[in-house]
Structure formats: C-alpha cells, structure tokens
C-alpha cells in the first residue's frame, strides 16, 4: 500500500516535470509562464511534504511536548514566502 507522503512526492515530481517539459517545448511566452507556475506549485508541494511529520504537532513549544514530534516550520515559511 502506498502512503500519503509517497503520493505527495510522486505528485510533486510529476508537477515539476510537467512544468519543465512545458518550459522546454513551448515557444509561446504565456504558455511558458503557465508551465513555470505549474513547476512552482510542484516545488511548493515538495517543500511542504518534506516538512511533514506523521502525527506531528504544530511547532509551538509548550511544556511536556518533545521537539521530535513537531513538524518542521522552515518549509512552511519558505512556501509562504514563495506565495507572497
């Protein structure tokens, strides 16, 4: 059985490959910009998936919660910066 993170990795790599294919094969500037947007969405999905921790909690430090059980906030911050 394939797990959810594996599906997200496959989806993100497919989006990146589709975007790169569009950039390399299209001559129309609008289509190239759309292909770059598709690749950017794949990269954002990959970053969020890399920061995923199964059963992880919000990265707000509270007493009694170990840091190993929290998701990584850096990929989330990078994606938010990329969107804005």
Image (cartoon, grey):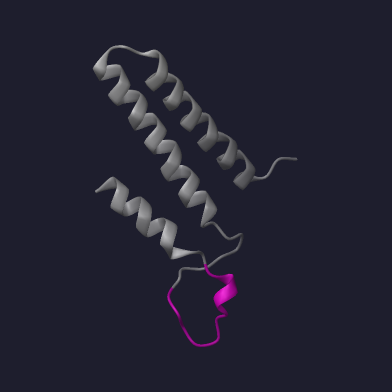
**Rendered image quadrant of residue 10:** top right
Q: Is residue 17 left or right of residue 25?
A: right
Reply yes or no: does residue 69 show up in magenta. yes
Name the dominant secondary structure of the magenta segment. Answer: loop
- Where does the image place residue 40, in percent across and percent down from the top left? 38, 37
Reply yes or no: does residue 7 show up in magenta. no
Q: Which residues are magenta?
A: 60-70
Q: Residue furthest top?
A: 27
Give the residue drawn at x 31%, y 48%.
82
Give the residue drawn at x 31%, y 21%.
32
Image height of 6 relative to 16, above or below: below
Q: Is residue 6 left or right of residue 63?
A: right
- Where does the image place residue 13, in percent across and percent down from the top left? 54, 34
- Where does the image place residue 5, in percent across and percent down from the top left? 60, 47
**Rendered image quadrant of residue 35:** top left
Q: Residue furthest bottom?
A: 63
Give the residue drawn at x 75%, y 40%.
1
Q: How many marks on residues?
A: 0
**Rendered image quadrant of residue 24:** top left
Give the residue drawn at x 47%, y 24%.
18
Image height of 25 relative to 2, above or below: above
- Where does the image place residue 20, in percent across and percent down from the top left? 44, 26
Image height of 45 relative to 32, above or below: below
């Amino acid at each position: 059985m394939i797990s959810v993170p594996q599906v997200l990795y496959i989806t993100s790599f497919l989006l990146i490959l589709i975007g790169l294919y569009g950039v390399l094969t299209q001559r129309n500037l609008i289509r190239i910009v759309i292909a770059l947007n598709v690749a950017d969405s794949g990269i954002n999905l990959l970053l969020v998936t890399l920061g995923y921790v199964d059963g992880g909690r919000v990265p707000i430090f509270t007493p009694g919660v170990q840091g190993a059980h929290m998701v990584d906030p850096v990929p989330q911050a990078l994606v938010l910066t990329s969107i804005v």
